[in-house]
Image: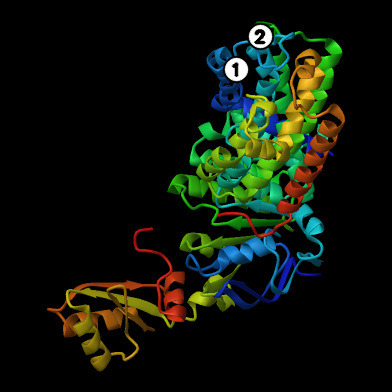
């Protein structure tokens, strides 16, 4: 079976700035693939290349065997896209937006009306059909956006930071609906860009993208297992001084990231109690945790993925 | 075909949902007609023509110029939607759809032109206020000319709007380029009365021929009395050529890929 997406040696630059540097990736049919990375890491450029909105400068991308550069029409027919900023007309009603969208994909007449009803039901849009999009809440706009993307019954769904700006409730709703669609259509392939850990954790496979390079490709569990055991995090009033002491007496690989000292250890509890005893006066707090994707990211790039605020 | 029609339809529906644009595109020219008509009109004491035997009221003479202004304003206000579409995100979903970019430009141009023509047709109903004698065939022929002119002006508006990042930039261009295009077209004062260099500019302005065309088709009597008005043949040729050039420019500019903010 051919892959849903095949990316071969894609590079892209904006003037002097290199956004993507020789990227290779494949996405299997029926899977959900995540591009995880910080803003400015190259995710959106890759997304736009796959969406046929940006012509490749070098390298090749095929989607279901169709080259995005030369067969963009064939690619687009099989593609559903959820943009970060909704691609809806705020002055039109929900129903009108879906109607126009369907016709742009060549779905018309009775079949289109049937599809719209189906999508309105699938995304719980119930009685909103006559409401103008600008009057809807962020969560409802996202649902219309999803209904729009699924209207033409795509085989491949591209999502760009799909839940950015949504409150936690709307975020959960969003993923519940995506899961429902996946169950209804197991051969559906999804690819999303994200900088959110909980979103990345839902993917079957993940690529860590940083500064235009792929740092690792694996399942979320596989990536986490690359971090040895537990992660112990310390905070202190004078973190630099404590770091030097910890490195000298415990682990030379201890690191300082955004004011916190991090150590990886097979047995976090033992290490934590030893540290607490050894530096009783200097430590403000000790935290022991199973590694998260953020830890993986720190290990691969030396930087955190998420701002502490988000 | 369904993609082209659906984009055209959306353009029209969207325009009428934004009341300020409908009002701006219709009431501004109406206000111009009355205010300038009453103000400047009195300075054209014995009428606008140079032939003392014929007297044409300024309000009547100015009328075809106002019709062209309505078409210009509507065409421009409708093409601003290109910038809104890009900002709101609608444009990216259209550009990612399996349709050609020519369809995207075509839908905009057709939608904007239909709007402009509808506003102009509405304004024709007000002709009796200015004592403009209308004939049915004259009105239909004038609407035909206005349709060609509308395509040219929406093409021009689309071309500019596609290259603009913000609506503020578009308004600046509008004041700098589009308003003079109308003012120096023989709409508000006859070409014959202008100074030498200004006359040259006016004769080089393609809109001048659109105005002359509407004048000649709509009110032949007033047109015949206007000294220096371009003839009907040359006016058709220039107006159609203007439309062809602008439609081509609008189509070509959409081919610039990668130009989609943000």
Q: Residues within 10 Å of mark 2 (few under 14, many from 20)?
A: some
Residue A161 to residue A251: above or below:
above
Q: Is residue A282 above or below residue B216?
A: below
Which numbered disc, 2 or 1, marks the residue that appears first in the sequence?
A: 1
Is residue B7 visible in the rendered structure shown here? no
Q: Quadrant location of residue A261?
A: bottom left
Graded by Cα atoms within 10 Å as few (under 14), some (14 to 19) or many (20 or more), the crowding at tag 1 reads: many
Instruction: Quarter of the image for the C terminus of chain B: give it.
Output: bottom right
Q: Nearer the viewer, residue B22 or A100?
A: B22
Which residue shows up at 57% across the image and 39% down it? B174
In screen coordinates, is A233 left or right of B62?
Answer: left
Chain assignment, label 2: B
Report how far apart the C-alphas of labels 2 and 1 lie in the structure.
Answer: 9 Å
On-image quarter of the N terminus of chain B: top right
**Residue A89 appears at what percent x and percent y?**
61, 38
Mark 1 belongs to chain? B
Q: Is residue B27 visible?
A: yes
Q: Nearer the viewer, residue B223 or A152?
A: B223
Give me the disc on residue B33.
1
Whether A246 is drawn above or below B234: the answer is below
Helix, strand or loop under label 1? helix
**Depth order, front residue of B137/A208:** B137
Q: Nearer the viewer, residue B43 or B136?
A: B43
| Proximity of marks 2 and 1: CB atoms separated by less than 8 Å | yes
Q: Give the side of residue A201 with respect to residue A150, left or right.
A: left
Badge 2 element: helix
Residue named by callout 2:
B130
Residue found farthest to the left: A281
């Amino acid at each position: 079976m051919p892959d849903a997406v095949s990316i071969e040696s894609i590079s892209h630059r904006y003037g002097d700035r290199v956004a993507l540097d020789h990227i290779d990736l494949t996405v299997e049919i029926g899977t959900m693939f995540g591009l995880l990375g910080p803003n400015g890491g190259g995710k959106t450029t890759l997304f736009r290349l796959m969406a046929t909105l940006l012509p490749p400068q070098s390298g090749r991308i095929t989607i279901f065997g169709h080259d995005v550069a030369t067969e963009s029409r064939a690619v687009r027919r099989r593609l559903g896209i959820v943009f970060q900023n909704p691609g809806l007309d705020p002055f039109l009603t929900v129903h009108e937006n879906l109607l126009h969208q369907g016709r742009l994909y060549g779905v018309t007449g009775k079949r289109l009306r049937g599809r719209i009803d189906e999508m309105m039901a699938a995304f719980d849009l119930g009685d909103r059909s006559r409401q103008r999009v600008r009057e809807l809440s962020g969560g409802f706009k996202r649902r219309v956006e999803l209904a729009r993307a699924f209207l033409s019954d795509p085989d491949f769904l591209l999502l760009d930071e799909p839940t950015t700006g949504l409150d936690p409730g709307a975020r959960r709703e969003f993923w519940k609906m995506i899961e429902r669609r996946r169950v209804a259509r197991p051969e559906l392939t999804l690819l999303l860009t994200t900088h959110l850990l909980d979103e990345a954790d839902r993917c079957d496979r993940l690529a860590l993208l940083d500064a235009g390079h792929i740092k690792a490709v694996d399942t979320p569990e596989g990536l986490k297992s690359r971090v040895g055991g537990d992660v112990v995090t310390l905070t202190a009033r004078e973190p630099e001084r404590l770091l030097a002491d910890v490195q000298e007496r415990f682990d030379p690989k201890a690191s300082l990231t955004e004011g916190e000292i991090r150590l990886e250890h097979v047995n976090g509890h033992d290490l934590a109690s030893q540290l607490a005893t050894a530096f009783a006066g200097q430590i403000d707090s000790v935290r022991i945790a199973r590694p998260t994707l953020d830890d993986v990211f720190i290990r691969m790039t030396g930087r955190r993925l998420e701002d502490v605020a988000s | 075909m369904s993609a082209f029609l659906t984009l055209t339809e959306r353009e029209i529906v969207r325009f009428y949902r934004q009341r300020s644009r409908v009002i701006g595109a219709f009431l501004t020219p109406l206000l111009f007609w009355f205010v300038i008509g009453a103000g400047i009109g009195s300075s054209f004491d014995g009428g606008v023509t140079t032939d003392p035997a014929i007297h044409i009221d300024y309000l009547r003479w100015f009328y075809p110029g106002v019709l062209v202004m309505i078409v210009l304003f509507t065409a421009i206000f409708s093409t601003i939607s290109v910038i809104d579409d890009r900002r709101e995100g609608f444009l990216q979903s259209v550009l990612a759809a399996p349709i050609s970019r020519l369809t995207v430009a075509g839908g905009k141009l057709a939608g904007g032109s239909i709007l402009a023509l509808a506003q102009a047709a509405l304004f024709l109903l007000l002709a009796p206020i200015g004592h403009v004698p209308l004939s049915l065939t004259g009105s239909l022929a004038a609407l035909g000319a206005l349709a060609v002119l509308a395509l040219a002006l929406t093409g021009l508006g689309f071309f500019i709007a596609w290259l603009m990042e913000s609506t503020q930039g578009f308004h600046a261009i509008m004041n700098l380029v589009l308003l003079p295009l109308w003012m120096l077209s023989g709409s508000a004062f006859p070409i014959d009365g202008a100074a030498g260099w200004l006359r040259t500019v006016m004769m080089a302005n393609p809109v001048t021929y659109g105005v002359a065309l509407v004048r000649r088709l709509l009110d032949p009597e007033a047109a015949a009395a206007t000294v220096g008005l371009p003839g009907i043949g040359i006016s058709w040729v220039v107006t159609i050529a203007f439309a062809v050039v602008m439609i081509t420019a609008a189509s070509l500019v959409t081919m610039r890929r990668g130009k989609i903010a943000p």
